[in-house]
Image (cartoon, rainbow, N blue to C red):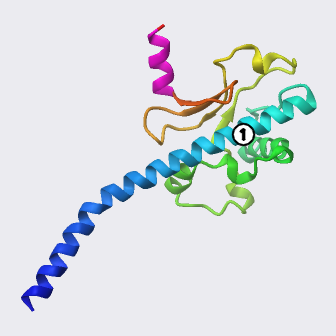
């Protein structure tokens, strides 16, 4: 009986010690997924640019009568033909923090990445190499919001600011 108690205690201690490891692995996997989402948005926007000759002209609204979902739906609709799906616009960490709302419900449609509102000139999105195309709406991975740039590279805000300070 004592041996069973000791075995249960050891297993309990091991499980307790493993929770932080699993949490770190999960956080790392979510950051990788978020980075992948940003790259897919970059690819979709790049294809949109090639086909249409300009950046999608989608207003952020500002009208109190306009639902927030209109902005999200407009971006989702603009890039869906070029690969990104509704799920591509969702950061898995933010989704978890929001307690996993059902994204198939119209009231839960959102974008966890904000696009730079370029003008309709064909070269504007490529004019500044370090201008973000899309940025995460919140710092949920540490080191600041994730950002995808004109060249398709993804970085976090802290790294970008450190690199600018070194110049």
**Residue 78, how many percent across, how many down?**
84, 41
| Relative side of 155 to 51, left or right | left
- Image height check: is 56 above or below 22? above
Secondary structure beneath dot 1 equals: helix
Is residue 164 shown in magenta? yes
**Residue 53, how many percent across, how many down?**
91, 25
Is residue 61 shown in magenta? no
Compare residues 73 and 159 and report the one nearer the observer.
Answer: 159
- Image height check: is 22 above or below 141? below
- Image height check: is 161 above or below 52? above
- Quadrant position of the N terminus in the picture: bottom left
The residue sitting at the right extreme is 52
| Relative side of 93 to 50, left or right | left
The residue sitting at the bottom extreme is 1
User: Label 1, on which residue?
Assistant: 41
Q: Residue at x 19, y 68 (%)?
A: 13
The residue sitting at the top extreme is 167
**Residue 58, how many percent across, how many down?**
81, 33
- The residues colored magenta run 157-166
Q: Residue at x 78, y 39 (%)?
A: 44
Q: Residue at x 83, y 16 (%)?
A: 123
- Residue 34 sits in quarter: top right
| Relative side of 39 to 32, left or right | right
- Residue 137 sits in quarter: top right
**Residue 101, how many percent across, how many down?**
60, 61
Compare residues 143 and 118 and report the one nearer the observer.
Answer: 143
């Amino acid at each position: 009986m004592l041996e069973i108690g000791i075995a249960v205690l050891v297993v309990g201690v091991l499980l307790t010690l493993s929770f932080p490891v699993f949490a770190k692995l999960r956080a790392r996997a979510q950051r990788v997924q978020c980075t992948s989402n940003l790259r897919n948005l970059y690819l979709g926007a790049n294809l949109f640019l090639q086909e249409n000759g300009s950046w999608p002209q989608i207003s952020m609204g500002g009208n109190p009568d306009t639902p927030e979902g209109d902005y999200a739906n407009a971006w989702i609709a603009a890039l869906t033909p070029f690969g990104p799906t509704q799920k591509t616009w969702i950061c898995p960490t933010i989704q978890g923090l929001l307690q996993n709302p059902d994204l198939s419900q119209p009231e839960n449609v959102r974008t966890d990445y904000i696009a730079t509102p370029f003008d309709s000139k064909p070269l504007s999105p490529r004019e500044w190499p370090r201008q973000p195309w899309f940025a995460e709406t919140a710092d949920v991975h540490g080191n600041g919001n994730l950002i995808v740039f004109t060249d398709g590279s993804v970085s976090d805000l802290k790294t970008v600011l450190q690199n600018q300070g070194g110049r």
